Image: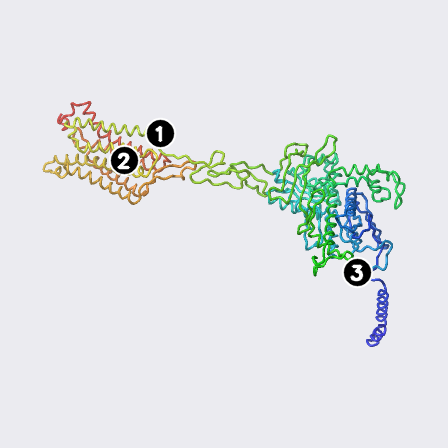
Amino acid sequence: MLICVSIFIVYNKVDPFEMLFLVVTLITLLIRAEEPACRLHGDPDLPLLSKDGDIIIGGIFSFHSTPLYANLTFQDMPQSITCKDANIKEFLFAQTMIFATEEINNRTDLLPGLSLGYKIYDDCRYMPLAIRAAMALMNQPEEGTTSNITCNKKSSVHAMIGTSDSSTTRGVASSTGPLNIPLVSYYATCACLSNKKEFPTFFRTIPSDYYQSRALAQLVKHFGWTWIGAIRTDSDYGNTGMATFLQTVQQEGVCVEYSEAIVRASPRQKVLQLVDVIKRSSSKVIVAFASFVDLEFLVQELLVQKVFGLQWIGSEGWISNEYLAIPENYKVLGGAIGCVINNDIIPGLDDFFQSLNPSGNQVLNEFLRTTTGCASSAVGNATYGNSCSSFENTRKINIQYTDVPELRITSNVYKAMYAFAHSLHKMYACQDSEGIFPNQTCVKKNGMDPWQLLHYMKKVNFTTKYGEKVYFDENGDPVARYDLINWQLSKESTIKFITVGLYDASLPDGQQFLMNNVSIVWAGDQKKVPKAVCSESCSVGTRKAIQKGRPACCFDCIPCAEGEISNVTDSIECIKCPMEHTTNHQRDMCILKDIEFLSFGEIMGVLLVVFSLLGACITIAIALVFFLHRDTPIVKANNSELSFLLLFSLTLCFLCSLTFIGQPTDWSCMLRHTAFGITFVLCISCVLGKTIVVLMAFRATLPGSNMMKWFGPTQQRLSVFSLTFIQMLICTLWLILSPPFPNKNMVHYKDKIIMECDLGSTAVFYGVLGYIGFLSSMCFVLSFLARKLPDNFNEAKYITFSMLIFCAVWITFIPAYISSPGKYTVAVEIFAILASSFGLLFSIFIPKCYIILLKPERNTKKFLMGKV
């Protein structure tokens, strides 16, 4: 290589400085080529707890809650990150992993001839430490070796359990995924981890937040809360879970007044702003999708500002946490209700916890110092004092932390270890020619790769010894089951988590959320479910109208309009009733409209019937008087034949008014109008005939006049028949072409139906009236001309007066008929018939009856001729 470089330098005439640079670079490459392929920088990370075995399972737990950051000077190698705030709960989770390992190793029916080992690390709920622990598990050197490390060796662990936080789990899963190492989390619930494209080797024994979010949404719906506030942890856990929750509750018609994020590292000013939002809001129910470490800061500030009486709905991240469940926090969180993992009791685990020996266990000794306050005689790696190593202190920690129902996650760690064990057992139980790998081969016991275990993990299916069935779906998630717990204060002033319900995602929709008969204590120690609505529910008979600029849950209740109903609460719109129905007073039911017509039973109908019959009786009586005195001069002088015909037609006029009363039918509608038209024309024709007779009689007295021979009895009868026949012809055409028919008038009134006779053809009807009016006008004109003819009893002036009444009645009838509503239209028509009939009867015949009955001395020919 040096010869090649020299030739290159000479040939290209390289500058001396460039030549020096090339030589230095070449020497550096030669030196590095002699170094090992991989070199460890710094000291190796060793596990806190470990045990050798044929198959090693890695574990990452949050033994501490807070990392202590080292100052970076960029002059020395950075110091290792240390942790504080011991988390006894996570320590017990790790002990559960050890318990399950020992239990599996002691079984003869599971993994016979093989032993499981473990390596457990602390991630301090800190992403860099979690990923560093995962890297240490995947490529861990032997203790004391820092050189000559090969980079192509297999992972030192075959699977991992961890972590407790969704964000750190995402980091670890992203690291283990490319190496096909199965990772099972016992506490990471973020729905984002169900994405198999991003996290192909991830499984979990705790349900996804997707199901928890849906369970909380159904809980909100179950208690009728439609106006809520929402608080979340600003992390993958809180953001993803709250996003699913908000999407679900909004589909259920629930409105969210505010949605705020919290994080423990936030400055106090931001926490104060959130408290101010809560105080100013009108919603009294708050859904908190948060971790307990983040929510704790908010609760402390709410205590300071005395913000009490709110109903809290909690996720499993804090609802059953013993650090929050203290009497002081009960003032804020009292009556809280939320979802937690099922509380499965693992046989033998409690005894295992009780038997823990702090002697020689540095991790347990640290927890004892933190939790029981025992003194220690040394620090660092030295042995702690006897006070911390006593079994009495171990029992204190067990009583304090293992006798609470919050310790539910232990079963998830237990199930994770058994999922590995059953997958390994299934894999090693494979027989030749029955394998699932190429050429139907099986896995060699001394040559297993993590990707082979991953294949069996996807199909694992077993039942724990306490009866729970464990398997994973296509996303690596288990069946979602939650207990619903309620914060209640015991007589000893301690907070108890009382199970009041159950959510099971495996049940059909609508049956997944079940409440038991346990009494729930609500915020403020109330026994009644609190209300959480922006607007009170709209009762039946009203509809919702959204308030401008506000969410859909804020609305006004507007009564339904006339003819519309709403028979359910919170109706969005009113339902229009059918045409023949109207609304009741409450506007919640359609009822049949009242049918209105002029009946015989009502007072007006009775009065009109009485007057009709009275008119007919008077007419018949007058006819009888005329018949009995038919030979007297006054009867003969007034054309007795036309008089009797006129009385007959008047009787028909009085009686035809009866056809207008009662419920209209096809026959009554046709009869009433045609009978009215024909009888009135007959009546007017008789009056017109009498008028013409009077005129002709006086004309005939003139010398040389022979007019009476042209208008004798025959001509009189013919004229009456001809005039009446024309009306009969008009009515016949009316009945053939467009006859009257009964009709339900539902337009004039909204609350009732008017039964009326539709005219069929309005033009023909007014033609009938017009013909009557024409004859009446002729009669009036002729009688007016003959009113001053000489005679003591000139009938023309009485006819003039009767025609004046007749025309006045029917002229006023037209506007009254048009403007009268409902049955009063018929009453006006009957009144016009009766009034005009009485007018004709009294004006023409009463004066004659007066003479016949009361003044018989005037009933002589001389008196009538004016000679007396």
Mark 2 = which residue? 807
- Give the image quarter of residue 664: top left
Is 70 situated left or right of 410 in this image?
right
- Residue appearing at x 27%, y 40% in the figure: 768
Q: Amino acid at mark 3?
A: Asn
Q: Along the line of sight, which residue is nearer the eye, 401 or 278?
A: 401
- In this rendering, the count of numbered labels is 3
List x then y, in percent, for residue 435. Answer: 70, 57
Sequence-wise, which precedes: disc 1 or disc 3? 3
Residue furthest left as drawn: 704
Q: Is residue 550 visible?
A: no
Protein image colouring: rainbow
- What's under tag 2, amino acid-wise? Cys
Per the image, the residue denoted by label 3 is 152
- Between circles 1 and 3, the one closer to the viewer is 3
The residue tagged with tag 2: helix, strand or loop? Answer: helix
> In the visual, does 442 lie left or right of 822?
right
170 vs 602, nearest the viewer = 170
Considering the image in quadrants, where does the N terminus appear?
bottom right
Q: Position of residue 340 (x, y in %)?
A: 69, 41
Rendered position, 12 above or below 256: below
Q: Mark 1 sits on what residue?
A: 601
Marked residue nearer the N-terminal end (2 or 1): 1
The x and y percentages for residue 603 are 35, 28
Q: For the C terminus, give its image quadrant.
A: top left
Horizontally, residue 502 falls left or right of residue 656, namely right
The x, y position of residue 563, in whole percent, is 46, 38
- Residue 113 appears in view: yes
Q: Secondary structure at mark 3?
A: loop
Residue 39, relative to residue 686: is it above or below? below
**Callout 1 secondary element:** loop
